[in-house]
């Protein structure tokens, strides 16, 4: 019996987006086609998806295992910890359900449950879907609840630690091109909020950039030194707080002066629009107030 890609995704725990990538880039599957060119997956194809998911989630690179025969995949999976083949838990489907479940786990200080929700979201929605539709709304909701007194600082710290871990961990099975462009990501000295920078790093990595993540609160001289040493195509900074601060404004201007003319400078984050108004005549800085704006800036700087 053959099923559609949506059914194969539900049965295997691999998102439709990832299934297509595994087919196109790695020839992991060869589904049949209907007269209307719809992909159809037989029982063995669904089994292969389950096996490949279990292997990549446990450290195997998809390029190494995608071409192996199904019996060999089964032998490798037998060596994994018990439960590796288990289907994703829960019946979450929509981004709103994932955000609600993540909030509930955060309020219980349940980091394992929160991690499971985010991993499930990545399977169902793909990396970009998780970033745009789950992580960003989740961070905003956590911030709102913290300001309203609905969350304790310790709740926010638990959630931030798990989100940070997810954003720093490459997608299982993902690979970069040998000559991928280099992006340096961080925040300037005085800017302690790093989740925005982490989102930038994860999003750029998903778009095929090689990312060097420097973390928060670093002098612009150090950021520039790293960019020059790495021959980076661009530097991306996240600025969240404070807004329209003369000190941060001077640091952005100083960084642009330190960087080579051919190295792009992208500034994003909640406070980015305010600083943009401080540089009305500066055309050598690209501004990104959202993830879509970041995508546009990264494409522009690659040209």
Image (tube, rainbow, N blue to C red):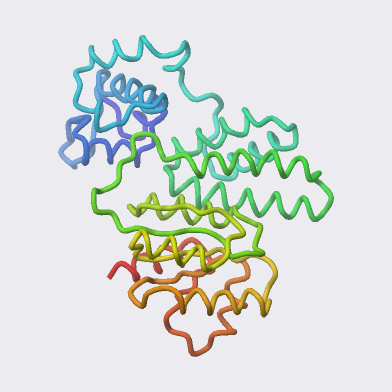
Quarter of the image where one finds residue 71:
top left
Residue under the point 41% across and 39% down: 171
Indicate the position of residue 59 as horizontal and vertical percent values. Answer: 39, 27
| Above or below, comparing residue 83 to residue 175 in the picture | above
Residue occupying the far left of the picture: 35
Residue 230: x and y, percent? 36, 59
* Figure quadrant of residue 74: top left
Q: Is residue 157 left or right of residue 283?
A: right
Numbered circles on residues, count? 0
Q: Quadrant of residue 189?
A: bottom right
**Residue at the spot x=54%, y=85% of the render?**
279
Residue at the image point whose x is 62% and y is 59% from the top: 217
Q: Is residue 73 above or below residue 9?
A: above
Question: Residue, x 18% and y 30% (percent of image)?
Answer: 30
| Nearer to the camera, 134 or 46 | 134
Extreme residue in the bottom direction:
281
Depth order, front residue of 162/89: 162
Q: Position of residue 155 (x, y in %)?
A: 75, 40
Quarter of the image with the C terminus in it: bottom left
Left or right: 280 with respect to 22? right
Query: Can you say which quadrant of the picture contains the N terminus?
Result: top left
Classify 19 as above or below 248: above
Q: Position of residue 183 (x, y in %)?
A: 39, 59
């Amino acid at each position: 019996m053959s099923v559609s890609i949506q059914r194969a995704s539900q049965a295997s725990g691999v998102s439709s987006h990832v299934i297509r990538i595994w087919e196109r880039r790695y020839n992991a599957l060869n589904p049949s086609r209907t007269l209307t060119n719809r992909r159809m997956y037989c029982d063995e194809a669904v089994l292969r998806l389950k096996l490949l998911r279990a292997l990549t989630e446990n450290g195997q690179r998809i390029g190494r295992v995608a071409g192996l025969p199904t019996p060999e995949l089964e032998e490798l999976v037998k060596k994994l910890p018990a439960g590796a083949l288990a289907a994703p838990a829960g019946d979450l489907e929509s981004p709103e359900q994932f955000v609600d479940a993540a909030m509930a786990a955060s309020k219980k200080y349940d980091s394992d449950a929160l991690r499971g929700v985010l991993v499930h979201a990545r399977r169902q929605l793909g990396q970009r879907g998780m970033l745009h539709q789950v992580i960003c709304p989740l961070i905003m909701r956590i911030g709102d609840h913290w300001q309203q007194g609905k969350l304790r600082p310790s709740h926010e710290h638990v959630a931030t630690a798990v989100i940070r871990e997810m954003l720093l961990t490459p997608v299982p099975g993902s690979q970069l091109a040998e000559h991928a462009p280099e992006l340096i990501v961080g925040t300037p000295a005085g800017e302690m909020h790093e989740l925005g920078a982490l989102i930038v790093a994860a999003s750029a990595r998903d778009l095929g950039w090689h990312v060097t993540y420097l973390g928060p609160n670093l002098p612009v001289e150090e950021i520039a030194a790293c960019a020059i040493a790495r021959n980076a195509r661009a530097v991306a900074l996240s600025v969240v707080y404070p807004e329209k601060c003369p000190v941060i404004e001077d640091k952005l201007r100083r960084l642009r002066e330190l960087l080579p003319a051919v190295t792009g400078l992208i500034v994003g984050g909640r406070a980015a629009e305010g600083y943009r108004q401080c540089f009305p005549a500066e055309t050598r800085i690209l501004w990104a107030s959202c993830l879509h704006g970041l995508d546009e800036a990264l494409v522009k700087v690659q040209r």
